[in-house]
Image: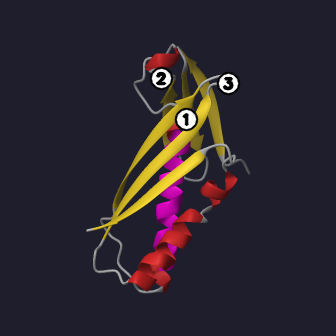
Amino acid sequence: MSTATARYAGNLRTEATHVASGNTILTDAPVDNHGRGEAFSPTDLVSAALGSCMMTIMGIVAERHQLDLTGVRWEVTKHMAAEPRRIGQIDLTFHLPATLSEKEQAILENAARTCPVALSLHPDIRQEVQFVYE
C-alpha cells in the first residue's frame, strides 16, 4: 500500500494525500523560485519534518522515562544553497522545561539527534540544533 498519493494542481502547486488518514498537504514553489509561496515549499516540508521527527523521538523517549513534554515548542529555519539549488543548512531551536535533569537532557538530546529524518538527510546538509531549557 502506498504511503501517499499526489497530484500536480498546476501553477507550481502540488497536493499530497496521506493514504491511511486522508490528510492532505499542499505545496507551492517559494516566491524566490517562481512560486506564490502560499503554502509550504517541498524544502520547507523537509525542514519541518526534521523538527517533527526529532520531537516525536524525544516524545517516545520521554514516555519511556515518564517525562511530560506537552507544550514543548521549536522553531526551524531553512537556509538554501545555490549551484545546485538545495537545502544547505537547517537550524532548529527546541524550548524544553528547565525542570529536566542533566541526565534527562542528555537522553532527550541524543534521541533528537538520532531521529530517522536526521540520519536520512545528506551529510552536506548542516543540522544546527539548539536545546534551550526554560
What is the C-alpha distance between the residues marked 2 and 3?
16 Å
Identity of the residue drawn at 61% across and 23% down:
8
- Give 106 or 63, whichever is nearer the viewer: 106
Identity of the residue drawn at 56% across and 64% down:
113
Residue at mark 2: 30
Left or right side of 66 for 118: right
Amino acid identity at mark 3: Pro
Identity of the residue drawn at 66% across and 58% down:
119
What is the C-alpha distance between the residues marked 1 and 2?
9 Å
Q: Colour mode?
A: secondary structure
> Mark 2 falls on what kind of element?
loop
- Residue 28 is situated, as x and y percent measured from the top left of the image, at 49, 25
**Residue 25 visible in this rendered orientation of the protein:** no
Amino acid identity at mark 2: Pro
- The span picked out in magenta is 45-61
- Give 40 or 94, whichever is nearer the viewer: 94
The disc placed on residue 43 is 1
Q: Which badge, 1 or 2, comes first in the chain's sequence?
A: 2
Residue at mark 3: 84
Amino acid identity at mark 1: Thr
Q: Compared with residue 38, is residue 4 higher up or lower down, i.e. above or below?
A: below
Identity of the residue drawn at 52% across and 14% down:
11
> Do the residues bearing badges 1 and 2 touch, measured as CB atoms within 8 Å?
yes
State yes or no: residue 49 in magenta: yes
The disc placed on residue 124 is none
Other-residue count near label 1 (Cα within 10 Å), few / some / many at <14 / 14–19 / ≥20: some
- Residue 114 is situated, as x and y percent measured from the top left of the image, at 61, 65
- Residue 48 is situated, as x and y percent measured from the top left of the image, at 48, 46
